[in-house]
Image (tube, rainbow, N blue to C red):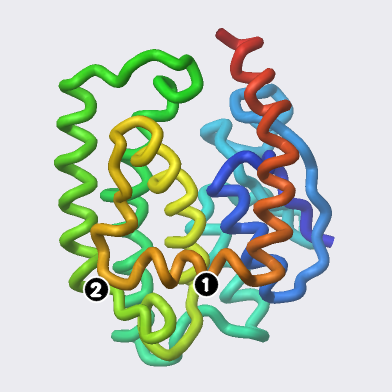
Amino acid sequence: MIALHGFAASNYYNLVKHVLLYKELPFQEKLVYGGSEALLAISPAGKVPVITTLEGLHISESSVICDYLEDTYTSKPLYPEQPAQRAHVRQIMKIAELYFELPSRRLLPYAFSGTPVPESVAVEVRQVLNRGITALSRLCQFSPWVAGKQFSMADIYLYHVNTIVSSMGVSQLNWDVLAEVAGMKQWNESMSQSAIAQSVEADRRANMPEFIRQLKAKS
């Protein structure tokens, strides 16, 4: 059985978990936090998530894990058949990571510590997010899914990226970032109603207090 290592408060962990659940693959969850010795033993950079395959191979980095799962378990495919369409899906995923998720993640330390975001940081984050808004507005279709008629990896990836983008935008910048992309809020709400999304979200909320304690213990 596949083992999924990490913790449910992590959106990267949750997007891999979402893929596993969508493909109906049996897996076990192994609780481990970032930077721990247990994680460093299986993850070169000490990051979550990590999966251990049936053959005992450890694979890290969420996008790499997702591609491995797609290539290995071909039922319920999450990428289109045509190369150009697959590239379109991956382009959305990459832009969501670089220009939505990563700048929003810069705000996490201020959210957890309760300290104000420095104006210089807020300006930089807004600039990058605006770049992402422009790009995703051009690429996303929401008709009804992110890349068009077919549910794809881009839907799962962007949905879990938006967990960070939405919460940090509202709480730290007083900015409803998702509302800036036409159709995104409605699509995001629709995604949140699925049984898989609700199950993953319940686990995320349940794990959050322990995750916060872990952060405070390190500080």
Residue 207: give x, y in percent of width and height.
Answer: 72, 37
The numbered dot on residue 139 is 2
Residue count near mark 1 (Cα–Cα under 10 Å), binned few <14, some 14–19, many ≥20: few
- Identify the residue at horizontal 32%, vertical 67% (top origin): 92
Residue 54: give x, y in percent of width and height.
Answer: 79, 62
In what element is the residue under mark 2? Answer: helix
Residue 41: give x, y in percent of width and height.
Answer: 69, 31
In what element is the residue under mark 1? Answer: helix
- Residues 39 and 13: in front is 13
Residue 191 figure quarter: bottom right
- Residue 12 versus residue 84 in the image, above or below: above
- Residues 4 and 206: in front is 206
Which amino acid type corresponds to the residue marked 2 in the rendered image? Answer: Leu
Q: Quadrant of the N terminus?
A: bottom right
Give left or right: position of 7 versus 156.
right
- Residues 212 and 91: in front is 212
Residue 95: give x, y in percent of width and height.
Answer: 29, 58
- Identify the residue at horizontal 73%, vertical 28% (top origin): 38
Give left or right: position of 11 versus 82.
right
Instruction: Report how far apart the C-alphas of labels 1 and 2 lie in the structure.
Output: 19 Å
- Residue 176 versus residue 193 in the image, above or below: above
Name the residue that disc number 1 marks: 190
Which amino acid type corresponds to the residue marked 1 in the rendered image? Answer: Ser
- Identify the residue at horizontal 42%, vertical 84% (top origin): 144
Residue count near mark 2 (Cα–Cα under 10 Å), binned few <14, some 14–19, many ≥20: some
